[in-house]
Image (tube, rainbow, N blue to C red):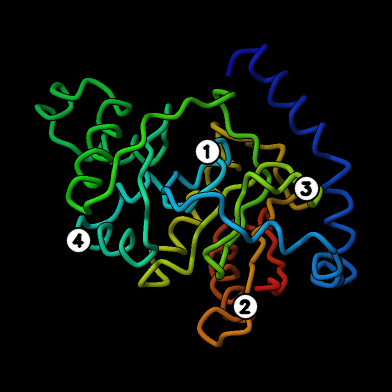
Amino acid sequence: MAEHDHSAVLEQFRQQESVFRELYALHEKDALDMYFESLRNLGNVFQLGDRCFRCIDERTPGGIHAAGPVILFDKAKGIDMLKRARAEGIYSHVGCGAAGIAFESLSDNMKKFYVNSDNYGMFYAKRIAKEAGIPYMGHLGVETHFHVARMAIYDGTGCLDSSKLGAIGLPPAFVISRRYHAESATAMREASIAAAIATGSHGYGSLIKDRTPFILLAVGTKHKESSLNAMMDEAKEVAKDFDGKVIVDGFVAPV
């Protein structure tokens, strides 16, 4: 990473430090759930502005989320997720890591055809939108060339609007729309991807450590299949692979 790039990453990390110091302290006191559940305006965060799919990427806020989106799924499972979520459309975006993973799995001839992962991400989103009978909404730009999230939200409600996180004092976060995954394994894979990005060269790298860990914030409901315990159990399985660099906490949504 170039020196000016490292400085930009460090500045973003420091800008979020006061927020995360408070979150870490609440986590240590086992009080993070009570903190969130006491927020008067928490319910507003669980009112989606639209039902269009975006990537889990924190730089693509709003709507419903899946890596790619759905580019890492078997096509039939991707279409099933879109239908389960009653999707109204689908976006691709600049510099999508999931599209990069999918692009690398292509044959050399197909790589030459698409040229780069951005082109492949757009193509896939258009094709899956057509097959699902929903509109392709466009190719979103992103504000930074690196990931700024120090948290991923493992959302059992399916209606968290990440464009409203600032209203409850949270910085941008990855969002995994767990409710619309037919299988826990696909949602857990997305949570693992988010943590790997944040702890890797496209995120904060070595700045994420056991003293300044990445947070997997589980959001549960009053329903058994998406209860807080169920969401946290899945998130904890993901965290096991990150040697203390990922911690898990959560709260019950007011929906």
Question: How far is mark 4 from mark 2, CA to CA?
Answer: 28 Å
How packed mark 3 is, by other alpha carbons closer than 10 Å (few <14, some 14-19, many 20 or more), is few
Which residue corresponds to the image point at 47% horizontal and 69% vertical from the top-left?
Answer: 179
The amino acid type found where label 3 is placed reads Ala
User: Sequence order check: which comes first, mark 1 or mark 4?
Assistant: 1
Q: Give the residue at the far left of this rendering.
A: 109
Label annotation for residue 60: 1
SS at circle 2 = loop
Label annotation for residue 221: 2
Question: How far is mark 3 from mark 4, CA to CA?
Answer: 37 Å
Which residue corresponds to the image point at 58% horizontal and 19% vertical from the top-left?
Answer: 1
Question: How far is mark 1 from mark 4, CA to CA?
Answer: 24 Å
The amino acid type found where label 4 is placed reads Ala
Quickly name the residue at label 3: 167
SS at circle 3 = helix
User: Sequence order check: which comes first, mark 4 or mark 2?
Assistant: 4
Q: Quadrant location of residue 84?
A: bottom left
Label annotation for residue 142: none
Q: Pointers 1 and 4 in contact (CB under 8 A)?
A: no
The amino acid type found where label 1 is placed reads Thr
Question: How far is mark 2 from mark 3, CA to CA?
Answer: 21 Å
Label annotation for residue 76: 4
Q: Nearer the viewer, mark 3 or mark 4?
A: 3
